[in-house]
Image (cartoon, helix red, strand yellow):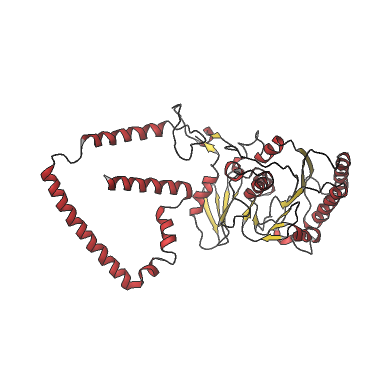
Amino acid sequence: MILILILNVLIFLDAFSFSMFHEHIYGYIYKIILPNGFHHFIGGSVGLILLSAGLLASAIIIWLRGENLWRSMQARFSNPVSNWYLVLILMSFGLSKVMFHYGSIHPKLSGVFPINFNLKKISKTFPDNRQFFYPSGDLECRGKQNPNLVLIVLNEWDRKDFNSTKMPKVFHMRKHSLTFNSHVSNGLDSETGLYSLMYSVPSSYMDSTRKIKPAFFEVLNKRKYEIVDFDNSEKDSIAHDESLHLKINQWSENRTVDSSTPFFISLKIAQRATSADREIQRVIFQLLKHGLLKNTNIVITGAFGGNQSNYTPVVWITPEPKGLEFNHPTSHFDLLPSVMEKIWGCKRSHREASTGHSLFNPKREWFLISGKKDFMVFDVKRDVITSVKDGVIHDNGGHPRHEFIFSAMKLKTKFYRP
């Protein structure tokens, strides 16, 4: 019975590990015990022969010993397996059927205990009948400070254009900011890229969030921020630019330097690198002129890297200027939750309102790049893109790891509950 219990626990842990992380238990054991491969561990061909002979001998000894024990048990007991054990098996079978048929899951227990306390039977199990939970819990924003925040988003910004020739003004800001050089946009175009930035989830959730604000805006409202949207993404003309800066100037003049109300400015820019560089500098100078940069974070990024690139830069200027550069992979799923964690102390922003991780976590091998239906898996470690379109898998590059597709599909359903 002890062996049966141990075996069932191992099966449970293995199934849980595979469903959560798409990796069996032996995968962890292999990484710890056999980092250089099995052949290296056993010492080559001689080690393999000795290991095989040892296992065969052990199997014969265990079989002979078990046979002797079984024969002695038959002589002492008429029914070694008691009836109560059979009843327990039947009860477990019945409980598993109940759990299978009654599956409206409580959001807090969804990943651990799939059963609805009301035992309300669900007649259909299609995805469109699932409930949507976003954010899925309290973000625990315990920070006392409310610094100002300016978010500047270019419609399209390839990291190749982020240099001293095309964007000298913004490029110079690297010396006083946190710069992320391997940042990935998680959208297939500017629209889905902007969505993945603001909501921190894949674009497959777009229909579900039509009447729901991003968690980021929910925190802004709770903390009573003044929210100002200067949208310059529709037109690209000198007249329109002058109108934009006139609006920024009017807003800045009407706001006192000592105002106790924090502000959030959102600015979307249609211009490409060189023109955007001048406009960003002008906006920052306008805020500086009116004394509005004190205690202000400025985040500059692109909604989309472009058709030829998945990378778009991130420049984060903090109230305490720091010239730090990070070259490990990051993504739009990480950006705003990391900002929320840093400026408001939101400890659970990544877990409850994002499919990403901290910007400062370097351990990332792949990213999901998603549209409303189709999606791609970008294996940054091997520089391979695997796209899934209409259920068909296409690879762009050698040695693809298709196991990431299952993990990507899990991200696309993280906030859905049956």
The answer to whether 41 appears left or right of 138 in the picture is left
Depth check: 112 or 200 in front?
Answer: 112
At x 38% / y 31%, what residue is drawn? 98
Depth check: 53 or 401 in front?
Answer: 53
Quadrant of the rendered image containing residue 378: bottom right
Residue 300 appears anywhere in the view: yes
**317 to 213, vertically: above or below:** below
Residue 187 appears anywhere in the view: no
Estimate the x, y position of residue 293 in percent, counting from the top left: 81, 49
Residue at the outermost left position = 75
The answer to whether 280 appears left or right of 348 in the picture is right
Quadrant of the rendered image containing residue 8: top left
Looking at the image, how many numbered discs can be counted on the residues? 0
Depth check: 199 or 123 in front?
Answer: 199
**159 to 213, vertically: above or below:** below
Estimate the x, y position of residue 155 in percent, counting from the top left: 73, 50
At x 83% / y 55%, what residue is drawn? 278
The answer to whether 327 appears left or right of 390 in the picture is right
Q: Which quarter of the figure is the N terminus placed in?
A: top left
At x 32% / y 35%, what residue is drawn? 93
The answer to whether 244 appears left or right of 105 in the picture is right
Estimate the x, y position of residue 325 in percent, counting from the top left: 69, 61
Estimate the x, y position of residue 284 in percent, counting from the top left: 82, 51
